[in-house]
Structure formats: C-alpha cells, structure tokens
Amino acid sequence: MTESAASSGPAKARPILWGFAFVFAMFGAGIFARTVDLNDFWSMAIMVPPMLLLIPLIRSGERRGSELGCNSQALVRYNRRSLIWSFTYMIALFVAVMAKDRLDPQGAVLWLVAMLPSLPIFYFVYTLRAYLREEEDEYLKMRFVEQALWGLALLLVLATFYGFLESFGAVPHAAGWLALPVWAIGMGAAGVWMKVRGA
Amino acid sequence: MKNRLKVLRAERDWSQQDLADALSVSRQSVNAIETGKYDPSLPLAFRIADLFDMPIEQIFLRD
C-alpha cells in the first residue's frame, strides 16, 4: 500500500503532457489560422483536432486520479458534462459563424446568431453547480473550489490590468468571451500547482 | 491540528485505502488528513471517531 499520494514515473506525466499538447495545439492552430489568413470555415475546422485532445486529456487525468486515490464519481460526471459543454460550444460557434457568413443576418436574427455560442455557458454553470452538490468528498470539493478561486483571481487580475491598458489605448481590444478560457487556464494551472506541491 | 490517524490505522493494519473506503472518502483525503494538510469537518471527524470507537479528542489534538 502506498502511504503517500506522491509518486513518480511516466504515468504521472501523462495528463500534464496531454494538457500541454492541448494548449499548444489550440494556440498553434489559432496562430496558424491567422498567419495563413484562412477563411472562417477553415479557421473553425482547424480547431477540431485540438479540441479532440480534450478527450484523452480528461481520460488520462481520470486514470491518474484513480491511481492516486483522488477521483470520485462526482468528478467523473463533472468531466463528462465539461466535454459535452465544450463540444456543444464548438458546434454552436461553428453554426453561428457560418450563419453570419452565408446568411448575413440583420436585426433580431443577428442578435440570435451572435448569442448562439453563448448559450452553452448556462450548461457550464449547471455543471459547476451540479459538481458542488454531488461531491461527497469534502477534501476534493475544497480543492475544486480553491482551484476555481485561483482561476477567478487570474481572470480578475488580467481583466483589470488589460482593461486599463486598453482604456488608455496601449493595447488592442480583447473580446469578452476570453474570460472563460482565462478562468479555465487559471483553474488548470492551480490544479497542476497543487499536485506538484502534493496537496 | 495534529492527529493520531496514522498510528491508529497502523495499529489495525489498515491501509489508507481501507480507511478511505470505510469513511467513503478518497484515499487522498485520508492522506491529506494524516499529514496535517487538511483538517476534516466536524461531521467527518465524528465519522472517524465512530469508526475507531474513540472520542474525537483522543484522535485529534490541539497544536
């Protein structure tokens, strides 16, 4: 029986490697799309392979969590719901961008099309709420809340600094929807940091 | 807060996983409590005390 949650070896590195692969693939695809000036369809299509990396990332994380004894049924359900919301968001964004390009909507229809990618955020909020209600392991719940607060801290700091830089004309405008990815990156980084510290 | 969880578990020849299963928590939770990284809630402390059939103050000690 292993006395400590800490261990070493390639198996521990796997979720982290998938995480890095996901982040680099997302940024790489985005930069590539801008560099070669792809049209909207291909700009969206090129993001599909990086998004698919979420599946092995989450599965390897769950495997590692089970090995370390830090997994729960509530976490597994949270991960499944997160995958659903991520892919729903991607599909909604694709449909909205295509509709904007092909149909050139105006007025109320334009509002509906523009709001379409935002709608999965409600399911995301439900996912957070459901996890906090379903998790029976108080330590895992505390860690989750702590990670979420670190994500929020990163978002608040970046939004405040960038917001003032933008107000003073020092940097270009940043879209508001970047808030969620920034929060998620902060939450993920906090999770990695907590694991590294053995918490 | 200090605790005698590791000693009490060893006396019964229980692994962390055995204790975690008995308490319906993750093994990481047991590890965090044993190493003093996490102080359990009062309900969980009572469950631990019930499991070892001991008063809470004989398991959890003031710093």
Image (cartoon, coloured by chain):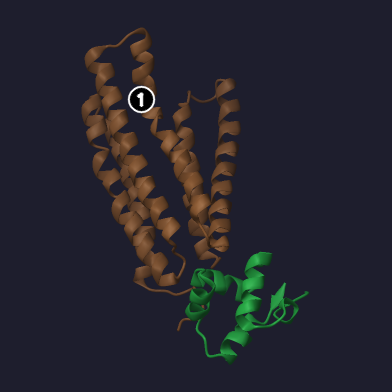
Chain colours: A brown, B green
Residue A137 placed where, x, y %? 53, 62
Q: Which residue: 33% across, 19% down?
A: A113
Q: Which residue: 37% across, 53% down?
A: A20
Quarter holding residue B36: bottom right
Q: Nearer the viewer, residue B3 or B20?
A: B20
Q: Which residue: 32% across, 37% down?
A: A88
Residue A30 showing in the rendered view: no
Quarter holding residue A93: top left
Q: Which residue: 22% across, 34% down?
A: A45
Residue A160 showing in the rendered view: yes
Does dot 1 land on a helix, a strand or a loop?
Answer: helix
Residue B35 placed where, x, y %? 62, 75
* Residue denoted by label 1: A116
What subunit carries mark 1?
Answer: A
Crowding at mark 1 (Cα within 10 Å: few <14, some 14-19, many 20+): some
Residue A189 placed where, x, y %? 49, 52
Amino acid at dot 1: Leu
Q: Nearer the viewer, residue A25 or A151?
A: A151
- B56 lies left or right of A175: right
Q: Is residue A81 above or below residue B24?
A: above
Q: Is residue B12 above or below residue A35?
A: below
